[in-house]
């Protein structure tokens, strides 16, 4: 079977989930920012490395074709959004001047939109602000949400994001859904902060790098049920109040065994994440971030039998990277996958240590795969 993705027409998991829109000038400015902003590489080193030359060619066109002085020293301070607005304003002004290569600008922008999978964006997310119609198809089996987790550094954003996620999940699950948090660490470092929630907390002893795959497999073994439904969820998700009901209902109605309740991920900038916590999502708009097209991670709903059929996640991937794409590929090879329209809103946290090391080294990114860890 495999290699079949169905875009299922159902309300998305996040009701403000309109996709970012790009016109010619916006696409060019987004590409320029994606080239200069270190956060672009930090979000996904392998994607950034593949697309770096394309963004570099955009910068060269903006400099030479549109005659805009974009220098290496053009500071991203005081903020990336300010940098983006400045670039966008300059490009718009240039495109309105007589004699500018507007057709070439359109070609460059089209290439950016068609060939990149990670791109800076600005979005209001208010085109669909109405609450989704309530949807829940009864499922007689067990439903479990598994969240792998590690936060070793105080105030890096991970624990705050997880607690925000749990507040939403526990309000809507009402005991009908098991929420399993697996802390993959050398000590149960955050047990005290999590024990006040109606969840199943488990500590998996791991003195090495964070092993997301092993934590997920550990959680699956705890809540295992032959006819059960699993949700593998990142704890940095900004969830809608109808997330659980919508996702279960859409999974069953789609007729598929696997559901990704979004199409793209939206990695929200640090400043905007802070404003979301202060004001709420709609009041924080416009929200700046990076859109990651057709992302394989973040959240997946699937039946236990499918999880078992592919052998779960490959615990050979340690640290950041590789495990989501590997799992997606193996599931895609045996099952039809349903995707919902819209985005997965990912709140900011500090990047993994191995990403910081890679950025400072200047060497190409390599996933850390250790067969002995499986």
Image: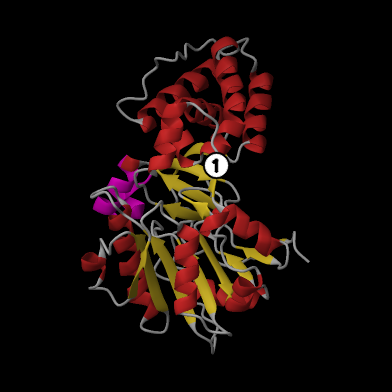
* x and y, in percent, of residue 373 in the image: 51, 57
| x 57%, y 28%: residue | 52
Residue 350 covered by magenta stretch? no
Residue 276 covered by magenta stretch? yes
Name above or below for residue 350 compared with residue 60.
below
Disc 1 residue crowd, few under 14, some 14–19, many 20+, Cα 10 Å: few
Name above or below for residue 303 compared with residue 100.
below
| x 38%, y 41%: residue | 353
Secondary structure of residue under mark 1: loop
* x and y, in percent, of residue 89 in the image: 45, 23
Q: How many numbered dots are placed on residues in this image?
A: 1
- Foreground residue among 115 and 300: 300
Name above or below for residue 234 compared with residue 223.
above
- Foreground residue among 358 and 162: 358
Classify residue 117 by image quadrant.
top right
Classify residue 190 by image quadrant.
bottom left
Classify residue 305 by image quadrant.
bottom right
What is the residue that sits farthest to the right in this orientation? 1
What is the residue that sits farthest to the front in this orientation? 372
* x and y, in percent, of residue 212 in the image: 46, 58
- Foreground residue among 66 and 36: 36
Helix, strand or loop for the magenta stretch, by majority: helix
**Where's the N terminus, which quadrant?**
bottom right
Name above or below for residue 93 compared with residue 205.
above
Magenta-tinted stretch: 271-285
From where the camera sits, is residue 159 visible? Answer: yes
* Residue marked by disc 1: 21
Query: Does 263 sit left or right of 6 as displayed?
Result: left
| x 41%, y 54%: residue | 210
């Amino acid at each position: 079977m495999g290699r079949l993705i169905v875009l299922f027409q159902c309300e998305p998991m996040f009701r403000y989930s309109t996709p970012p829109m790009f016109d010619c000038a916006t696409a060019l400015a987004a590409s320029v920012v994606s080239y200069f902003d270190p956060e672009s590489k930090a979000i996904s080193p392998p994607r950034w490395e593949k697309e770096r030359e394309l963004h570099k060619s955009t910068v060269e066109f903006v400099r030479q074709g549109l005659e805009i002085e974009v220098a290496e020293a053009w500071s991203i301070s005081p903020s990336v959004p300010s940098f983006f607005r400045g670039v966008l304003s300059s490009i718009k002004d240039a495109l309105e001047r007589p004699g500018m290569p507007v057709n070439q600008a359109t070609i460059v922008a089209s290439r950016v939109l068609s060939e990149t999978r990670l791109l800076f964006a600005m979005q209001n997310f208010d085109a669909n602000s109405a609450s989704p119609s309530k949807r829940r198809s009864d499922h007689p089996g067990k439903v479990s949400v598994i969240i792998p987790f590690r936060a070793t550094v105080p105030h890096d954003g991970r624990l705050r994001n997880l607690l925000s996620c749990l507040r939403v999940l526990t309000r809507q699950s009402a005991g009908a859904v098991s929420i399993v948090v697996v802390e993959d660490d050398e000590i149960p470092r955050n047990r005290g902060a999590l024990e006040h929630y109606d969840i199943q907390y488990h500590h998996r002893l791991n003195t090495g790098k964070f092993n997301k795959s092993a934590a997920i497999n550990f959680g699956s073994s705890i809540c295992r049920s032959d006819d059960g439904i699993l949700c593998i969820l990142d704890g940095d998700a900004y969830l809608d109040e109808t997330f659980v009901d919508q996702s279960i209902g859409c999974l069953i109605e789609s007729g598929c065994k696997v559901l990704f309740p979004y199409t793209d991920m939206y990695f929200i900038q640090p400043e905007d994440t802070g404003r979301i916590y202060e004001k709420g999502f709609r009041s924080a708009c416009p929200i700046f971030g990076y859109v990651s097209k057709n992302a394989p991670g973040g959240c997946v709903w699937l039946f236990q039998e499918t999880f078992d059929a592919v052998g779960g996640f490959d615990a050979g991937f340690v640290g950041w990277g590789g495990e989501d794409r590997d799992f997606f590929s193996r599931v895609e090879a045996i099952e039809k996958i349903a995707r919902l329209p819209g985005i997965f809103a990912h709140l900011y946290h500090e990047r993994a240590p191995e990403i910081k090391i890679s950025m400072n080294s200047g060497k190409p990114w390599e996933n850390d795969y250790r067969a002995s860890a499986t």
